[in-house]
Image: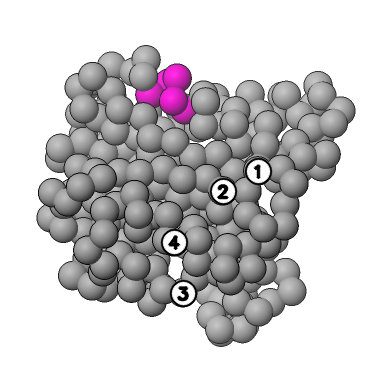
Amino acid sequence: MKYTVLSDIGQKRSVNEDCAAMFVRPDFVRLGVIADGMGGHNAGDVASNMAVTKIGEYFENASSQQFSSEEAIKHWFIEAVKNINSLIFDYSLTHEDCQGMGTTFLAVVLTEDQKVLCHIGDSRAYEWDLGDMKQITKDHSYVNVLVENGEISPEEAERHPRKNLITKSLGTEKTIEPDFISIMLPLNSYLLLCSDGLSNKLTVDDMANILLTSIPVSEKASQLVQLANTKGGEDNISLVLITNTQEEV
């Protein structure tokens, strides 16, 4: 399995409020994570860094048994997310410049037999397999509620003035319930985790065309970020790109 992680400030922002990482345990269980922070006075970067740092600590200190099955992984995520949510929420209450801060949270645990996504907010996961690129998470956003209720079309959602209003985030409420998605990650497929700085600028065809190329995984990631910047780069751009091909990193 190959992977690469990139986080870019973009073309317009003065602070990178995204945070992305991949953690690998001695037993070869892997954790990929993306967090896109929000909050006044650039507190978003505090929230996103807290989320990624803490989930990494919990992951590295967990027992192998906690990743032995899909249900075990979900239980581990639920406990970890509950603790991190409380840490961010309490921090925001005791630090005036961080009041109201929060972050999206998108993570995947990968073992030999299990691949489980944990999702809060509008950071997205995409799957590429046999040339087909599709979004596999559902945004926790105001416009996605409108789409699911049939009030607007997906095309109208892309242009909606409240497109960036999310309905669920880590650290803004006392409690949080993440979504879970189990995936397969077949041979020669890709899993892309990204912040909306990437997904707001690139279509699935843009992404698929880059992943179809024969360049190394790290260069594919760089091209994805470069294209998002070329198309405006108004937001921070972060991704974790994972593949089980034998190609070079």
Residue lying at the far right of the rendered structure:
96
In this view, the residue in front, 247 or 94, is 247
The numbered mark at residue 224 is: 4
Residue 56 in the magenta stretch? The answer is: yes
Q: Earlier in the sequence, mark 3 or mark 2?
A: 2
Tell me, yes or no, whether the two marked residues, 2 and 1, touch with CB atoms within 8 Å.
yes
Q: Quadrant of the C terminus?
A: top left
Residue at 45%, 50% in the rendered image: 239
Q: Quadrant of the N terminus?
A: top left
Residue at 41%, 73% in the rendered image: 206
Q: CA distance from mark 3 to mark 1?
A: 23 Å
Q: Amino acid at mark 2?
A: Asp
Q: Which residue is mark 1?
A: 16
Q: Bounds of the magenta span? A: 55-59
Q: Secondary structure at mark 2?
A: strand
Q: Amino acid at mark 3?
A: Thr
Residue at 63%, 24% in the rendered image: 87
Residue 228 in the magenta stretch? The answer is: no
From what the image shows, is residue 129 above or below residue 65? below
Residue at 51%, 49% in the rendered image: 238
From what the image shows, is residue 118 above or below residue 66? below
Q: Main secondary structure of the magenta part?
A: helix
Q: Earlier in the sequence, mark 4 or mark 2?
A: 2
Eye-nearest disc, 3 or 2 = 2
Q: CA distance from mark 3 to mark 2?
A: 19 Å
**Residue 3 at x, y = what percent?**
30, 44
